[in-house]
Image (cartoon, rainbow, N blue to C red):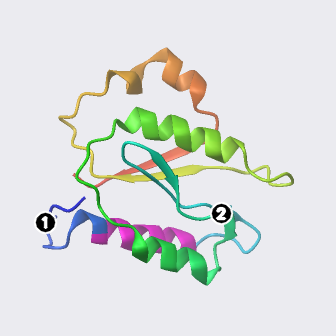
């Protein structure tokens, strides 16, 4: 994420902008949780309403890591978190912003096991 994209911005700067744009469009009764993935899952916030200023501050504070993470591992962890949402919230989705290269080989992404583990609708924004 530290690499520069075509417009000269780092992919992390683009990811932050995309995350803030997404949060701005979240409904007032929807909950959001910011989670990052490197070698470990790190829950950066608890469940917050999209209008909560803490969420924007948490997005601004995310730093890029120089580690490689399989997208499948992050998706499985994100699915577990989304499925453990507070009671009374039935809608759920995962939005993933990644700098994963199409050349990265993650055989787990296309496995039947992977499809069974993902419950909520998943939206992936690839930056490369």
Element type where label 1 sits in the image:
loop
Residue 22 lies, in percent from the top left, at 51, 68
Residue occupying the far top of the picture: 112
**Residue 20 in magenta?**
yes
Q: From this view, report whether residue 8 is shown above or below residue 85.
A: below
Q: Magenta part of the protein: which range? A: 13-23
| Label number found at residue 46 | 2
Q: From this view, report whether residue 42 is shown above or below residue 31.
A: above
Camera-nearest residue between 64 and 30: 64
Residue 92 lies, in percent from the top left, at 68, 50
Total number of numbered discs in the rendering = 2
Mark 2 or 1 closer to N-term?
Answer: 1
- Residue 49 located left or right of residue 55: right
| Whole-number angstrom distance, CA of label 2 to CA of label 1 | 33 Å
Which label sits in the foreground, 2 or 1?
2
Element type where label 2 sits in the image:
loop
Mark 1 closeness class: few <14, some 14–19, many ≥20 residues within 10 Å: few
Q: Residue at x 20, y 62 (%)?
A: 2
For label 1, the residue is 6
Q: Residue at x 63, y 69 (%)?
A: 26
**Magenta-drawn stretch, dominant element (helix, strand or loop):** helix
- Residue 127 located left or right of residue 18: left
**Residue 49 in magenta?**
no
| Label number found at residue 79 | none
Residue 15 lies, in percent from the top left, at 35, 65
Camera-nearest residue between 55 and 38: 38
Residue 55 lies, in percent from the top left, at 56, 74
């Amino acid at each position: 994420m530290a690499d520069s994209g075509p417009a000269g911005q780092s992919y992390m700067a683009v990811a932050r902008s995309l995350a803030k744009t997404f949060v701005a469009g979240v409904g007032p009764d929807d909950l959001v949780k910011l989670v990052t993935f490197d070698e470990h899952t790190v829950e950066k916030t608890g469940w917050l309403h999209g209008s909560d200023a803490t969420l924007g501050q948490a997005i601004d504070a995310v730093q890029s890591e120089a580690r490689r993470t399989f997208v499948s591992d992050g998706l499985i962890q994100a699915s577990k978190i989304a499925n453990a949402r507070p009671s009374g919230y039935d809608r759920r989705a995962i939005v993933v912003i990644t700098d994963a290269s199409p050349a990265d080989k993650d055989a787990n992404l296309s496995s039947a096991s992977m499809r069974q583990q993902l419950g909520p609708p998943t939206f992936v924004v690839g930056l490369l």
